[in-house]
Each structure stands twice: as structure tokens, then as C-alpha cells.
Image (cartoon, rainbow, N blue to C red):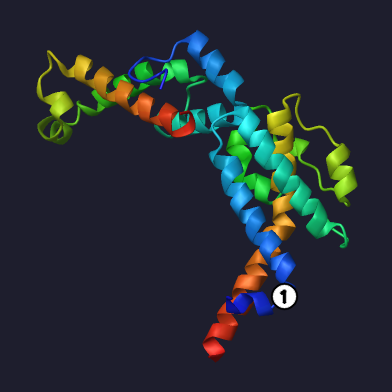
Amino acid sequence: MLYAHTRVNREEEEYLRAVSLISWAMALREARAMCPDIKSLTEFVECCAQRTLNMCADPQAKTRSVICADTFTSRQKAVEWCLQLEDEIVKTYYE
Amino acid sequence: MSRRQFLTDQARALLIDRVVAVYDEMIKARDSVSRVTAAHKLIALAVALLSEKEVSLTPDLAYDWIEVLELVGITRDKLPTFSSIKELLSWRFHDSDEVDKFVKALYLLVPLFREAALISAAAASLDKLH
């Protein structure tokens, strides 16, 4: 899988769109379930990480979530988690 | 031999089974070439199955895909109702062959899925009788 564990950049997104426009649209639809306002897959990780970190403001989430537990590493953990999620979404529609 | 095959013309029921399998192939395709190939098969099967009938081809099933279609630039107002297969096939929905064939295949699935549902319902009724 060409895109495993890499953040989708503009060039890669263009490639995905060229490989299959419908698959790209299905992947973007899935990404929009978490980030409704994104216009492309390249915006997903940033938006997802920010939303995840926003949830850490909730005291209950702070105690339950591994991501929120340590404020020094939370951003890095959120980005890692979102990269994994992005990879899974892309893999679902492209081999 | 399953009981449902006695409910309708056997060849027709088998072709409808094939349509369902090709639909699955089409939506799970990972690239344009495989998707267009599956869509071609589906359209050919649908034409064979529907050519004897008068059909009103509505975008009902396509509405299940409306979000995906909107992302590739096809909004609801670009999905008309067609009175014949010929009319549908001569329409161009999108510059991309993949998208164009995909939408046409979705249209043709509406009457075929309805028929598949009728066959299943009839089979279920027959099962109850036994």
C-alpha cells in the first residue's frame, strides 16, 4: 500500500482521484463523518487532531483518554491516532 | 435447486442474482478500470433484463449515493427521470467514464432490485406455506 502511514498530501490526493473518482469520493465522505467541513483528504489529519484535542477539554475525557492524559504528548498522540485513522480510511477504498 | 427458482423464469432469476453480484463488484472496486468493467457488465445485464419492459428510470437508488455523487459534482437536479433505457444510455452525467457508468448502473438497479425484492418476498411466502 503506497500510502500506508503517510499523511495524504496534495499530489497523493490527485493520484487517488485519478485512480478512482468514486473511491476518492467515498473516502472523503467517510472522513467527513468526523470532519464535515473538510474539502479534501489533505485537511483530514489536522482537523481530526484538533477535534480530538478539543475533546480533552471535557474533564471526563481527560481521565479516560490516553491521548488527553499527558498534555506534553497529547498533540503528538492525537496526530498519530488521526494518521492511523486516515490510513484505514484510504486503505478501505484503495489497495 | 432452491425453491425460489420455481417462482419465476429460472434464467431471469439467475441473471438478477448476477446483477446483485456485479453491483457488489462495482462498489467495492478500487480503481476506475475495475469499476467501469463491472458497470459495463451490470448495464449489459440490465439491458437484457429490462428490454422487454416499459420502464420509468428514476434516480431513487442514486439518492442513496447522493453524498458521493455530490462530491464528484452531480447534484440532485442533475438526476432526471428517463422513460427508456435508450434515453438513459444516451445521457452524459459526467466527463469521467467511471462516474458516468456508475450513475447509469445505479439507475438500472432500481427496477431490478425491486424485482429481486419481489422474488425474495415470494420465496419467503412460499417458505411460510411449507
Q: Position of residue B64 (x, y in %)?
A: 60, 47
- In the rendered view, tell whether residue B7 sits above or below residue A38: below
Which residue occupies 14% across, 36% down?
A60
Q: Provide the chain ID for the residue under circle 1.
A: B
Which residue position holds label 1? B8
Foreground of the two, B70 or B25: B25
Q: Is residue B57 visible?
A: no
Farthest bottom residue?
B130
B120 above or below B38? below
Give whichever of B18, A18 is nearer the camera: B18
Q: Is residue B34 visible?
A: yes
**What residue is drawn where x is 77% and y is 32%?**
B93
Question: Residue at point 68% right, 27% down?
Answer: B73
- Packing grade of label 1 (10 A; few <14, some 14-19, many >=20) is few
The quarter holding residue B88 reads top right
Q: Give the residue furthest to the front.
A: B1
Q: Is residue A85 left or right of residue A12?
A: left
Q: Which residue shows up at 48% across the image and 24% down it?
A: A37
Q: What amino acid is at disc 1?
A: Thr
Residue at disc 1, secondary structure:
loop
- Residue B130 lies, in percent from the top left, at 53, 90
The quarter of the image holding the N terminus of chain B is: bottom right
Front-lying residue, B93 or B79: B93
Query: Looking at the image, which is closer to me, B87 or A36?
Result: B87
Q: Seen in the image, is B71 located left or right of residue A43?
A: right
